[in-house]
Amino acid sequence: QQQVKQSPQSLIVQKGGISIINCAYENTAFDYFPWYQQFPGKGPALLIAIRPDVSEKKEGRFTISFNKSAKQFSLHIMDSQPGDSATYFCAASNNNAGNMLTFGGGTRLMVKP
Amino acid sequence: EPEVTQTPSHQVTQMGQEVILRCVPISNHLYFYWYRQILGQKVEFLVSFYNNEISEKSEIFDDQFSVERPDGSNFTLKIRSTKLEDSAMYFCASSERDWDGTQYFGPGTRLLVL
């Protein structure tokens, strides 16, 4: 019930295209859903996050869409750039359970020039 | 911009040896975490720490692991008797508040147990 399932495992997108990564969760107690970006040899860096009281959040080229009834959320990267090539992790946490982050399996994104 | 720092960046040790991984969280943060990432796998929660106490711990965080905040700035993870399967990247994270969930990660320590 603690799992967060992420797809696809890898994604290749042309420069300027839209990258879409999906996550699904089971635990309805989760109340915080961040996305992290990780470059090789570096720690995860917070990209954008959403709470379940809104269905969408946009920051620049990055948008989270959240579907509470389906227990799914997704990351959209508009106008994808080669510099976006990284591994992306979705995560979820419960404020009443220590805020430990449960991570998805990760998506390796490659944006081709 | 404030950031979480970790030392060492790499650590090689023999099986059965003790290792201490060090972290300096962001200065005004009160909540501290350790995660690990086995090569090619997802990031896994180990332990959270607040007010000099463990808040939560995962099943991975068994008796061979311990955490400590020895002074006002450092946060350490000790592995008492390392095993081959402890080889992983260990990340420290910190957050200012518990209610907003935002955690900032350090660059990690790559631990290799031979």
Image (cartoon, coloured by chain):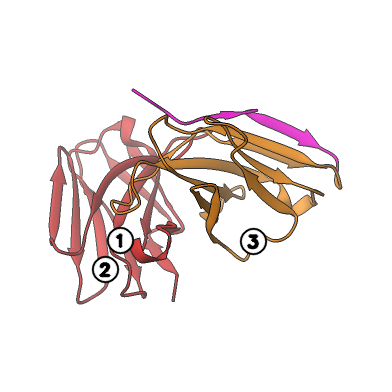
Chain colours: A red, B orange
Closer mark to the observer between disc 3 and disc 1: 3
Q: Amino acid at mark 2?
A: Gln
Give how far across and how far down residue B11 sits, in percent: 72, 32
Residue B6 on the magenta segment: yes
**Residue depicted at x 44% and y 69%:** A3
**Residue depicted at x 44% and y 41%:** B94
Secondary structure found at label 2:
strand
Left or right placement of residue B101 versus residue A53 in this view: right
Q: Residues within 10 Å of mark 1 (few under 14, many from 20)?
A: some
Residue underneath mark 3:
B60
Residue B47 visible in the shown view: no
Closer mark to the observer between disc 2 and disc 1: 2
Give how far across and how far down residue B27 sits, in percent: 42, 29
Classify A55 as above or below B52: below
Q: Chain of mark 2?
A: A
* Image quadrant where residue B114 sits: top right
**Label 3 vs label 1: CA separation?**
27 Å
Q: Amino acid at mark 3?
A: Ile
Give how far across and how far down residue A76 sits, in percent: 21, 50
Residue underneath mark 1:
A22
Classify A77 as above or below A92: above
**Label 2 vs label 1: CA separation?**
7 Å
Residue underneath mark 2:
A72
**Are labels 2 and 3 on one chain?**
no
**Label 2 vs label 3: CA separation?**
27 Å
Classify B76 as above or below A1: above
Q: Chain of mark 1?
A: A
Left or right placement of residue A17 versus residue A43 in this view: left
Of A73 and B68, nearer the camera is B68
Of A36 and A12, nearer the camera is A36
